[in-house]
Amino acid sequence: MWELLWPAWLGGSLVALVAAPLGCLLVWRRLAYFGDSLSHATLLGVGLSIWLHVPVWGGIVTVCVLLALLLASVLGRPQLPSDALLSLLSASTLSAGLVVISQQQGVRVDLLSFLFGDLLSLNSQDLPLLVMVLIGVLGVLAFCWRDFVLTAIDEDLAAVEGLPVLRLRVLLLLLLALVITVAMKVVGSLLITALLVIPSLVARPLACNPHGMALLAAFTGMIAVSGGLLSSFYWDTPVGPSIVLVAALLFILVQLATLIKLRMA
């Protein structure tokens, strides 16, 4: 069993490890829906890459990065409400991706694997590139963590401290685009936001500081990946949705424990 599952477990755990601090930053900045918009855009990247006959992951990265730059430039403008804009882009890019894929003649596309992930197809040949991308993202996060946290708490205070707020926002969104591209293999385009946000919500009531919340979120994500893989192996459930359900179950358990603790206090 271990020989079959270890590449998937290692890849999924690395994605969860890197997604955790990004998810915390999204929760603190109240930009969770931004991840949803970017994740839905991955399907448009798939469709365009098939249409243009270029590597699929290249098309996904290109679309996500371009959308991240677009959103970084327009978010915060009073003429464009952020929630409405993100909702528009989320629905539009997902619909455009489905339309483009449906028009491809003579090309067989496993749409379910793109929508809900196909972690078990990950093999040892895929791991080196995955590890390099995730270690690079984690290194940038570690180097800029203090600045990211300060801007997430209060952008005006960060600007007063002399931090390049706009550049940090663009950098955060570009890192998010890269992680979403990689995470598509784990949980698919429809469920990536859950892998980003749910572990952060699980860790929030348990942590005393931002560093602790990021570490607890990473641990929660790794538990969710492990539980989802075991569920898929023993009960033949889809891996991506199983990972999300395990994370959601952990969230419910933590909320119940917190409620009981408050009632007993």
Image: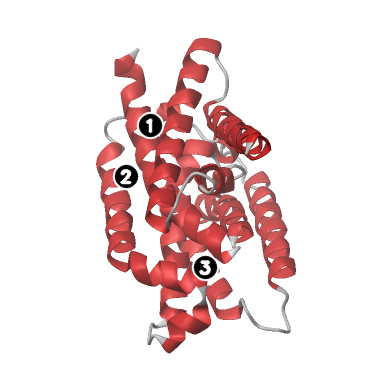
Whether pointer 1 and pointer 3 mark residues with C-beta atoms closer than 8 Å, the reply is no
Q: Earlier in the sequence, mark 2 or mark 3?
A: 3
Residue 59 in sight in this render: no
Above-or-below relation of 213 to 123:
below
Q: Secondary structure at mark 1?
A: loop
Quadrant including the C terminus: top right
At label 1, the amino acid type is Leu
Residue 95 shown left or right of residue 149 in the figure: right
At label 2, the amino acid type is Leu
Circle 3 residue: 68
Q: Quadrant of residue 17?
A: top left
Residue 122: numbered disc: 1
Residue for point 46% across, 18% down: 230
Residue 164: numbered disc: none
**Residue 114: image location, x then y, percent:** 55, 40
Give the Cα separation between the discs numbered 2 and 1: 10 Å
Quadrant including the N terminus: top left
Above-or-below relation of 82 to 225:
below
Circle 2 residue: 130
Above-or-below relation of 195 to 139:
above
Give the Cα separation between the discs numbered 2 and 3: 21 Å
**Residue 159: image location, x then y, percent:** 45, 85
Q: Quadrant of residue 143?
A: bottom left
Residue for point 63% across, 47% down: 101
